[in-house]
Image (cartoon, coloured by chain):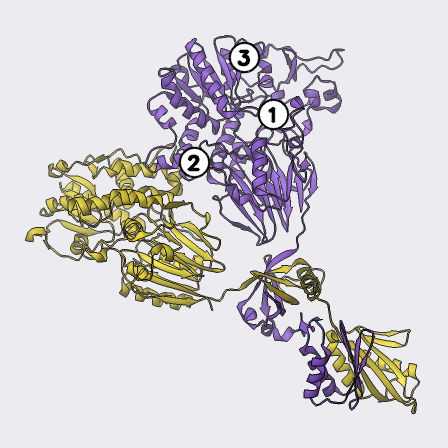
Amino acid sequence: MPEIKVTPLGAGQDVGRSCILVSIGGKNIMLDCGMHMGYNDDRRFPDFSYITQNGRLTDFLDCVIISHFHLDHCGALPYMSEMVGYDGPIYMTHPTKAICPILLEDFRKITVDKKGETNFFTSQMIKDCMKKVIPLNLHQTVQVDDELEIKAYYAGHVLGAAMVHIKVGSESVVYTGDYNMTPDRHLGAAWIDKCRPDILISESTYATTIRDSKRCRERDFLKKVHETIERGGKVLIPVFALGRAQELCILLETFWERMNLKAPIYFSTGLTEKANHYYKLFITWTNQKIRKTFVQRNMFEFKHIKAFDRSYADNPGPMVVFATPGMLHAGQSLQIFKKWAGNEKNMVIMPGYCVQGTIGHKILNGQRKLEMEGRATLDVKLQVEYMSFSAHADAKGIMQLIRMAEPRNMVLVHGEAVKMEFLKGKIEQEFSIDCYMPANGETITVTTNPSVPVDISLNLLKREMALGGPLPDPKKPRTMHGTLIMKENSLKLVSSEQALKELGLNEHQLRFTCRVQLQDPHSDPDTLHRIYTHLKSVLKGYTIQHLPDGTVMVESIVIKVSSSAEDTNTKVLLLSWSYQDEDLGSFLSTLLKKGLPSGLC
Amino acid sequence: MKLYCLSGHPTLPCNVLKFKSTTIMLDCGLDTTSVLNFLPLPLVHSPRLSKLPGWVSKDGTVNLEKELKECAGRVFVDSQPEFCLPERELLDLSTIDVILISNYHCMMALPYITEHTGFTGTVYATEPTLQIGRLLMEELVNFMERVPKAQSATCWKNKEIQRMLPGPLKDAVDVWTWKRCYSMQEVNSALSKVQLVGYSQKVELFGAVQISPLSSGYSLGSSNWIIQSHHEKVSYVSGSSLLTTHPQPMDQSSLKNSDVLILTGLTQMPTANPDGMLGEFCSNLAMTIRAGGNVLVPCYSSGVIYDLLECLYQFIESASLGTTPFYFISPVANSSLEFSQIFAEWLCHNKQTKVYLPEPPFPHAELIQTNKLKHYPSIHGDFSSEFRQPCVVFTGHPSLRFGDVVHFMELWGKSSLNTIIFTEPDFSYLDALAPYQPLAMKCVYCPIDTRLNFHQVSKLLKEVQPVHVVCPEQYTQPPLTQSHRSDLMLELQPPPMPYRRCSVLNLPFRRRYERVYILPELANSLVPSEIKPGISVATVSAVLHSKDNKHTLQSTNVFLPCLVLAPKPLLSGAVPLEAFLATLQKHGITEVKVEETADGHILHLQAEDTLIQLEEDGTHIVCDNNEPLRTTLRDLVLRFLQKL
């Protein structure tokens, strides 16, 4: 029985370093190749030795697919392809291909230049890695080789995020990457057709959350920012350069416009301008409303939002600053945080998920004293707010996607074990399908039961369809008989006659002639007629003919009568049939042996 | 399989393919050359046009001076211009299931087909095709509605009268079916029926047929289409290009193994080299400007204009045209320039790389930023106050019958300093200029048509090897004006099947197989036996389900109540005498008398009073009514035979 295997190397019962291996129909596919924000050691990358202990990555993998540009999904890519060594195809969408190298370079700079780590991938490696990337378009069916095909679907979440449908023969797997089932201010909602995959591998970041309406969250966010500004405080919003940042910018921009506010809004790092450019050039990946109006007013040209300079952090008076990175684990957001943390008038708003081990995660858990490098401690006096703006599907959204795709099995990744457990129960209960949540390095196996595609001769198909009457009822099943010819890789179903002809075989006729003795004191013709009448009354629905040449035919079975030489009352019937009529012939000979009923005329 | 041909224009095709149970329209081109028979629609009152004399037949019996005007020996209809629609009587258009659009030039008749004919199907197109097609339609409607014409001339269409008119009006065909332009409301309704598709996306139609668009390299989002079932493949090639301009390169390899290839949209200028034309365009432009004249470029607002602007971007500095203003005037100029920048997925590799930087893929963004190129919705408004001469104006419509170009013809036509440069190949420039004669301005004809030429197409067909080729009849003979050029036609073996407007072709196609799926349970129960080395057979008795054109075979066990006994299989092979005798002996039948006959042997089983006639292609068992004996013998014979 064919099997599909799924092994997470990362993101198994965890968020971070997403990397999932799928084996399907003899093909091996790596889904995402991310890094873990919570670690600075070997654990930051997936454990590729799982594969390399048996040989080279290139020999094992048929392709690598990256779902979107977040580093926990693509951060290990140059390490994997250039340092571990992989030369096969890497697939990602155009926006991901455009943005991913910038974030990788950023990540490299922070790690190597700022933290001074060695043995890390270089700028050149990022470039070489990107040369192996083949861009994917939405809904395009890409033939990786003759058997393996992949197709990308819109996933929302961030610009260019995709879900991917992987198919070999009639077996298939869908991997969601990160996705969002509700449209937001700049992106649309994820969508997939009823593709009924054998396995749906879904993220489950918000497995237990059912988030309140988007509008409430937005109102809350604006209210908090406004209050802080009013009392002269500073607001820090740690974000990743692309994604939530743009959505919140659109939100603040329109609010500033409406309320006629004057406090400055800044966006840190040189990426801003560039990032917004990407949104303008890839506007077809944003939501309907933005796409429709972009000629008149491009939503990504901000009037109120200016570039940030690090000296501004010490300026007096209120301000709002968007700074990268989003989990306060390094870089400018962390620097500003350190400056502002001591003042209770200020506020930090965490708009997304924070991985364990990051400062973002610590302060969200209420930690008020932070140990910094060099044994210094930092007192956190500013207000800490968490607002879930990260565009992941919540429990409701995940259930909605299952309803859309109708998978036969479910695998949860990219979430915390406890929360997964809860969702798994819910899924199994509501959809009666198996749901798995493998840990890193653990393999789950699903057996599939694919049907076998066969070429049926049109003659045979039409003959069978015609047997059901002139206008066959499509709902009514019909029986069909034929011969399946298996030759090399082709399977052909044809009528038996055609099979003989195609294989160049002669038909072998097998006939039976059976003598049946019968006591019937009538003339031969009368006996024959009595047989005819008898069979007519017994066999309904068969063609029975009394032919002038002195035979009775039941379908194609021939019956003749002759008198015995000694006794004219003893008749000898000769029944003759071919093997194809064996059942009827055998039945007739047994029936006639019993004699004819007396009441016949 | 049949093909109904509704348009005779080889580059603006409209064909309908009936394939399996589906009816598929391939493109929806609108033949706009009919507008050349009409007077131009001026934006502001033109004394010259209004003073043209009316037409009266030579003998004075026919007087149509209200409807027809004479200009420089040609007669024009003074009425709102009308278009020649695809044929609508050849088949019932309401039966069309889907319409496949190959590029934005080939969809202009869409509202005529989808509205008011009872059409209830779906239109498939790529996103750039839809967006830019919408702009071109919007522009056309705008051009017409901006200068409403009260008069609608119909008398001249009377057959008796048309016969007496001078050419080319006399020879115009089906003039009664010509229609005025649609409204914006009809455009919106028609385009709401479009379903977007991406290159290489596979779309199932009713489970019977799969369609898939392929990049054709001609314009943004332009596609060829594959229409196939599991066993048959039709390729539809329309407007394709192998030149490296801005669109994604043409996907040629996916066209391989077609049973039928329908070929339309070859270049209309087989003898003009696009690169050479581009060079001539630039030099003529520079020459005119240096001499203090203005340059008028009648063009469509999307397509080649992007390449012209890119070429000028590189040319401006070297030709010291840095201070010359370039104007692009169209109701959709801004949208067209903006839209061109957001379709990274549909662009050639070079342009995609620019987007990754991120930079706009087309350099006209920079021309606009540096104020070298300005765009306006029309000559009214800002343009009239900001406009400086000498300048270069890009504007439509290329037919010179409507749009802002009419104004510039009136304005600049009288001076020989000015130049008009024709770049669009759709209209004969002499016909286009006819209602403006006599004309002092210089005329340069540099038609740029990047579509496949005959040399490229024969190479392509050699590569992809279709079994049959169908094409417009124009491609099967040299052009009328160059009848000696046998290289300007398709020469194939077997010869292509030509079509013309209103042809109905029976495509030579024999469908022999269909796909059926054997469900796992049944598949596991089959018992294959090897008949020849590498070839196995298994008899199949199953329940056939047919739903949505998908067929599946299921094990009969599931349907016991309605079970029909499986018929016995056919037999093949021969029964060898010695082996058979040995087997009989094993089963206790020892008294066998063998008699040789002409065709084989007769075995007489004496104890059982039974005869078995063994021959090469048959076995006959004659016995008394002893069922156990008969079935034993039957099974022994069957052991030696193959069952099919």
Alpha carbon of mark 3 to alpha carbon of mark 2: how far? 45 Å
- The picture places residue B482, in percent across and down from the top left corner, at 65, 22
Q: In which chain is the residue bearing label 3?
A: B
- Frontmost of labels 3 and 2 is 2
Q: In which chain is the residue bearing label 1?
A: B
Q: Residue at x 70, y 16 (%)?
A: B166
- The picture places residue B326, in percent across and down from the top left corner, at 40, 19
In the foreground, B548 or A199: A199
Numbered disc 3: secondary structure:
loop
Give me the disc on residue B46: 3
Q: Are marks 3 and 2 in contact (CB under 8 Å)?
A: no
Q: Amino acid at mark 2?
A: Cys
Give me the disc on residue B348: 2
- The picture places residue B122, in percent across and down from the top left corner, at 55, 45
Q: Amino acid at mark 3?
A: Ser
- Whether residue B192 appears in this view of the structure is no
Q: Amino acid at mark 1?
A: Thr
Between disc 1 and disc 3, whose residue precedes? Answer: 1
Q: Which residue is mark 1?
A: B33
In the rendered view, does A405 fall on the left or right side of B183?
left
In the rendered view, does A444 fall on the left or right side of B501?
left
